Amino acid sequence: MAETNGSQSNRGADEQSLRMISSEPIGNEPVSDEELRPRALEGFIGQPLLKAQLQLFLDAARKRDVPPDHILLAGPPGLGKTTLAMIVANELQVPIRVTSGPAIQHAGDLASILSSLDEGEVLFIDEIHRLPRPAEELLYIAMEDFRVDVMVGKGPGASSIPLTLPRFTVIGATTREGMLPSPLRARFGFTAHLDFYPKGELERLIERSAEVLGINLAAGSARQLSLRSRGTPRIANRLLRRVRDWAIVHDLDEIGPDDVEAALELFQIDSEGLDRLDLAVLNAIVKNFDGGPVGLNNLSAMVGEESETVETVCEPYLVREGFLVRTPKGRVATQKAWQHLGLTPKDDVSKLF
């Protein structure tokens, strides 16, 4: 009997040891970003005009029983371009092939992908503005004439063999539409511009994500999160996960507005959605440069960040929310920035613009 108990104890220890080193998750399966994405256009929250346009575009293609024209999705990162591409493929009930501009190094890489597409399939190219020039030129012909020219041989004896492609749909996503060459942009039959989300739509999106993640939000909590999400669904979902972590550690069954505020204060996200770097930029302009104007290089040196980081990560939101103004002489903090930092603005701050 003692031997039996001993063997059971050893077996239990072995099972526990295997569990500790196993790659399998313990407890409930985590919800991935893929599961947070709606699979139908009806479930996509926000962008009402774009949704109406896209619904009409897809309905017409289904009634004509042909693959739809190529689609360009343009807008800042995190607004749902990839999600919309997945929804289009799901609405059309066709497979989707996913790649990105930086992943395609040579025209041959793109030719290999295009030649393997089936009739009606969707090819999603993220960051399409970063395609190399030879691949762009190959894509022009493929999108318009549904063929690629394959080069055989080298030197004077090289020849081009046209390869006919089945009809397919390219969905391109870009955060820098102005970097797309005109010939490529002109080949998209439908261009959708995604805008930042108003706080009401973000609140609905956060409530939906909380339901999917199994997070119990009290009244007002989603509103507090939406105020700090910079108009961007990706940021909203990220902050929701961090608030969930706070609730787990503090053994909370329900997350209230005060919990949201306390959790995000720990992660240095303030009531306007400004993070550590945003506040460092504003403090540098106001306290070290007397409100500005200050050049980008001096500003980036003061906050200890690359000038490109300050210009592309911080400034767009600060300018959009009215904390910062770009002038020919440099960056200037607005009256709103002074007040947000709890300081008295200069009387002549508007004269600096």
Image (tube, rainbow, N blue to C red):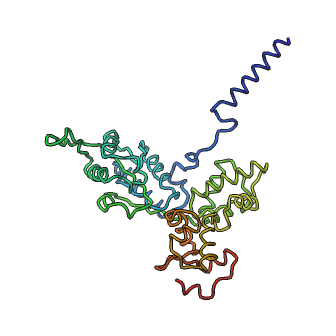
Percent across and percent down for residue 350 are 56, 85
Figure check: 41 above or below 201: above
Residue 273: image quadrant is: bottom right
Where the N terminus falls, by quadrant?
A: top right
Residue 221: image quadrant is: bottom right
Figure check: 10 above or below 149: above
Q: Residue furthest left?
A: 156
Residue 131 in the figure: left or right of residue 263: left
Residue drawn 52% across and 54% down?
Answer: 42
Number of numbered discs visible in the structure rendering: 0
Front-most of residues 317 and 29: 317
Front-most of residues 339 and 192: 339
Residue 20: image quadrant is: top right
Percent across and percent down for residue 249 are 76, 48
Percent across and percent down for residue 147 are 25, 46
Residue drawn 64% across and 65% down?
Answer: 227
Residue drawn 73% across and 52% down?
Answer: 246
Front-most of residues 94 and 96: 96
Residue 29 in the figure: left or right of residue 139: right
Front-most of residues 327 and 246: 327
Percent across and percent down for residue 132 are 34, 52
